[in-house]
Amino acid sequence: VDYVCWLGGHFTDSSDRRALFAAGMKHIELHERALLSTLLDGNANATGLRRLVGVSVFLDHDDLTRRDLILGIGFDRVDFTQAVVEYARRGVTVYERVATSIYSKRMLESFGLTGAVRVSPIHCHSVADMERFLHITREIATESIIH
């Protein structure tokens, strides 16, 4: 709460704790939406997930105001478990969600998926972090095509 109020103080002149918190939450939401946009559509420095060859974005939706900063992705030529290993080798933490897991089964099956790589950045990440992730994702997808 204190952090969010501190952040909100950068965007409002109010000293009211509720107003500070509301301003902080609004700007966290805007920052997360910008990160999500970078992940999905890329920027001048990195190709977004939607355009990466060999990568699929699951349950994609154009209206970013209706999305959280959580993505499910898959690779054409890398299974979910191996993709998580490849990310870890490169210093990136993502999570495997597979239908054989009792924790993921119902959710995945309800969406018609057998699995996904769960990507869940948070508001303390930067655009540079997203660009690095996109470069690594492209690398994993490209290596799978070459081999």
Image (cartoon, grey):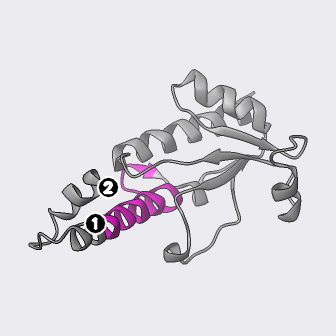
Whether residue 138 sits left or right of residue 23 in the image: it is right
Q: Secondary structure at mark 1?
A: helix
Q: What is the quadrant of residue 101 in the picture? A: top right
Q: Which residues are magenta?
A: 24-46
Q: What is the quadrant of residue 8 in the picture? A: bottom left
Residue 13 screen position, x and y as percent = 8, 72
| In the image, residue 57 lies in the stretch drawn in magenta | no
- Magenta stretch: dominant secondary structure: helix
Q: Amino acid at mark 2?
A: Val
Q: Amino acid at mark 1?
A: Phe
Task: Give the quadrant of the C terminus.
Answer: top right
Q: Residue at x 56, y 33 (%)?
A: 93
| In the image, residue 43 lies in the stretch drawn in magenta | yes
Give yes or no for contact between labels 1 and 2 (Cβ–Cβ under 8 Å). yes
What label does residue 1 carry, if any? 2
Residue 144 screen position, x and y as percent = 72, 33
In the image as oriented, which residue stretches furthest toward the top? 89
Q: What is the quadrant of residue 1 in the picture? A: bottom left
Q: Residue at x 73, y 48 (%)?
A: 74
Q: Label 2: how many residues lie within 10 Å, few (<14), some (14-19) or many (20+)? A: few
Residue 15 screen position, x and y as percent = 11, 69
The residue that disc 1 covers is: 21
Whether residue 13 sits left or right of residue 102 in the image: it is left
Q: Nearer the viewer, residue 24 or 138?
A: 24
Q: CA distance from mark 1 to mark 2?
A: 7 Å
Q: Residue at x 68, y 32 (%)?
A: 84
